[in-house]
């Protein structure tokens, strides 16, 4: 009953004031939304104008680099002084200007087209779109630089070619005067042509929905229009050419044809253009609704937090007992790493300390048990290795003895070299794991010795799936199986002896198959099933045990006889887990005590 009273008091103290404050503040926030929205639009238009100013400023830097380029000046002066003809000068200047076109992205992302025109209207590097340099209107625009002291001129298709008043341009142009360093007379002009689509790509990511963006010249003529409001036909009602300078760098609300909009206008400083944004104010209603939803969400969150706090305070005396109970359940499920921090110095705190001491004792007993198990496992592996290695060395030395008795020097040399490689592989101290390719090197050396002692050499067929050669397997795994294939199969083979080694990846397992065309097993006499035969020697049995010790009971080696099938011989099937080199380090570390 006391917990219920405490819960009610906390709710009254926290929830009621929060609800009252939220109701009063909601009206204030909604009233401020409109002015904040207008301010945000104005600020973002100004930021976009600054971004475009930086882009055209970079474009202007490219033009000034061309004007100050000594190679271009030299080639042009040689042409004007008659030291080079037009063809020679054209080849040089076209290449210089093309280099600037190809590398202009280092200074500007707008990627202009560039041309150079002398005072005699000789054109170099003409890659401008639309053949504008063949039109007298554009050449007239250039001529004004020769007649005045103006160094830079910005123009567009709509201005140079006198298009309809509110038809926007396809291209913009930056014209720079190139003056003689001695007479300061304009001798040529550099023209940089910029596609409007390139400039538009800089603007589009920064546009709102229901917004029109216009770039206009100083007289209010639109030269770039991105019209999301579909008001291009009535732009003259929104852009007042007479007041374009009066409202520059300002924003105001304007109504035309029943549409309430915010018009913001800022100059692009390094050009004679102005950026104008026209944004539909109907979005303010959506913002109001969003604010109301956010307020309601805030109230709900506050209520939830309040109830949670009330519940927390009402349950604070039960918390230590609940935590102890939960941790005991974790221990019951096998998690012995949990610990509890005493929350007080009373009986509950003492019980918590005893709980931690009990878990420490349990973990100590588990570690002792694991250590004994690992020691037994290491001892078993060392015992199995001691059985495999002598068996291998005995068989190899027997083959070497018969070869030496034959007094064949070349064969003896080959056997010694191969035996040296075999011993290096078998006695190497580089850990218990090798790649499949390294294990197969032992097979190649071993068969060199075998072929010296057999009437017919063994034909070996390797069929390795791509990637399996680099997988790790336990050392001395394939050796006993190949030995058995030779002694129990290939040496009793009535035909040409053949050995095939196949590796495949099946699911998460590596399957290695070793087949020989020996006589196989007589399953009718043995009464054994056709698959999963008992191994043919203690060496194979040790290999099987070794695999299970390392990888688990689901892995191992099995035999099957093919005598009664459509083929002949015996097939050993080794099933191992897939262990890559980088994963193998972990497994190797687990068996460092077994080396």
Image (cartoon, rainbow, N blue to C red):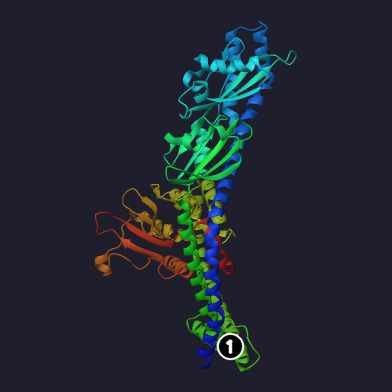
Nearest the camera: 318 or 144? Answer: 144
Nearest the camera: 249 or 407? Answer: 249
Please give left or right for residue 392 compared with residue 90 in the image: left
Q: Is residue 438 above or below residue 182?
A: below
Please give left or right for residue 567 compared with residue 150 in the image: left
Query: Where residue 214 sits: x, y (%)?
Result: 51, 36
Q: Is residue 92 above or below residue 434?
A: above
Q: Dividing the picture into quarters, in which one does residue 180 lie?
A: top right
Residue 432 in sight here: no
User: What residue sits 45% from the left and 48% below the top?
Assistant: 452
Nearest the camera: 244 or 279? Answer: 244
Q: Is residue 83 above or below residue 467?
A: above
Badge 1 crowding class, 10 Å Cα cut-off, few under 14, some 14 to 19, many 20 or more, is: some
User: What residue sits 57% from the left and 42% below the top?
Assistant: 48
Nearest the camera: 415 or 516? Answer: 516
User: What residue sits 52% from the left and 67% below the top?
Assistant: 385
Q: Is residue 128 above or below residue 260?
A: above
Q: How many marks?
A: 1
Residue 117 in sight here: yes
Query: Where residue 133 sits: x, y (%)?
Result: 52, 16
Query: Where residue 4 sits: x, y (%)?
Result: 50, 89
Q: Label 1: which residue? A: 355
Q: Residue furthest right?
A: 182
Query: Where residue 169 sits: x, y (%)?
Result: 48, 28
Determine the secondary structure under disc 1.
helix
Can you say which quadrant of the picture contains the C terminus?
bottom right
Q: Residue furthest top?
A: 82
């Amino acid at each position: 009953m006391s917990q219920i009273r405490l819960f009610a008091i906390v709710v009254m103290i926290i929830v009621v004031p929060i609800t009252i404050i939220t109701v009063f503040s909601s009206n204030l926030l909604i009233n401020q939304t409109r002015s904040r929205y207008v301010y945000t639009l104005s600020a973002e238009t100004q930021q976009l104008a600054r971004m475009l100013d930086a882009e055209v400023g970079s474009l202007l830097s490219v033009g000034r680099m061309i004007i100050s380029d000594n190679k271009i000046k030299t080639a042009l002066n040689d042409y004007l002084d008659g030291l080079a003809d037009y063809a020679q000068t054209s080849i040089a200047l076209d290449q210089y200007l093309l280099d600037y076109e190809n590398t202009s992205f280092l200074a500007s992302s707008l990627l202009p087209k560039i041309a150079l025109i002398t005072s005699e209207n000789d054109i170099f590097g003409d890659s401008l779109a639309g053949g504008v340099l063949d039109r007298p209107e554009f050449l007239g625009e250039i001529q004004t630089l020769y007649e005045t002291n103006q160094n830079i001129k910005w123009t567009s298709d709509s201005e140079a070619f006198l298009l309809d008043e509110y038809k926007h341009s396809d291209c913009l142009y930056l014209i720079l005067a190139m003056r003689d360093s001695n007479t300061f007379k304009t001798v040529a002009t550099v023209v940089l042509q910029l596609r409007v689509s390139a400039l538009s790509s800089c603007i589009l990511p920064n546009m709102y929905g229901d917004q029109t963006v216009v770039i206009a010249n100083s007289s209010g003529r639109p030269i770039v229009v991105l019209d999301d409001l579909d008001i291009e036909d009535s732009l003259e009602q929104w852009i007042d050419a007479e007041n374009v300078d009066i409202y520059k760098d300002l924003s105001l609300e304007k109504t035309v044809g029943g549409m309430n909009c915010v018009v913001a206008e800022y100059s692009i400083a390094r050009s004679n253009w102005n950026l104008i944004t026209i944004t539909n104010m109907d979005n303010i209603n959506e913002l109001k609704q969003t604010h109301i939803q956010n307020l309601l969400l805030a109230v709900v969150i506050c209520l939830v937090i309040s109830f949670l706090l009330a519940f927390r305070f009402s349950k604070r005396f039960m918390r230590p007992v609940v935590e102890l109970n939960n941790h005991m359940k974790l221990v019951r499920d096998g998690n012995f790493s949990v610990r509890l921090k005493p929350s007080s110095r009373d009986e509950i705190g003492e019980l918590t300390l005893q709980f931690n001491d009990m878990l420490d004792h349990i973990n100590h007993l588990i570690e002792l048990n694991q250590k004994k198990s690992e020691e037994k496992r290491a001892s078993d592996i060392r015992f199995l290795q001691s059985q495999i290695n002598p068996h291998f060395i005995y068989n190899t030395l027997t083959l070497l003895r018969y070869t030496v008795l034959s007094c064949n020097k070349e064969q003896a040399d080959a056997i010694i070299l191969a035996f040296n490689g075999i011993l290096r592989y078998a006695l190497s101290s580089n850990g218990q794991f090798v790649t499949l390719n390294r294990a197969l090197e032992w097979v190649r050396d071993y068969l060199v010795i075998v072929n010296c002692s057999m009437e017919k050499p063994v034909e070996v067929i390797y069929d390795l799936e791509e990637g399996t050669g680099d997988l790790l397997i336990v050392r001395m795994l394939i050796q006993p199986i190949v030995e058995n294939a030779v002694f129990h199969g290939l040496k009793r083979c009535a035909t040409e002896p053949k050995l095939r080694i196949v590796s495949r990846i099946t699911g998460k397992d590596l399957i290695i198959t070793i087949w020989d065309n020996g006589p196989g097993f007589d399953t009718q006499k043995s009464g054994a099933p056709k698959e999963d035969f008992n191994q043919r020697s203690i060496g194979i049995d040790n290999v099987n045990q070794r695999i299970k010790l390392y990888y688990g009971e689901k892995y191992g080696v099995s035999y099957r006889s093919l005598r009664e099938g459509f083929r002949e011989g015996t097939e050993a099937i080794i099933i191992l887990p897939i262990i890559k080199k980088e994963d193998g380090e972990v497994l190797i570390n687990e068996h460092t005590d077994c080396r």
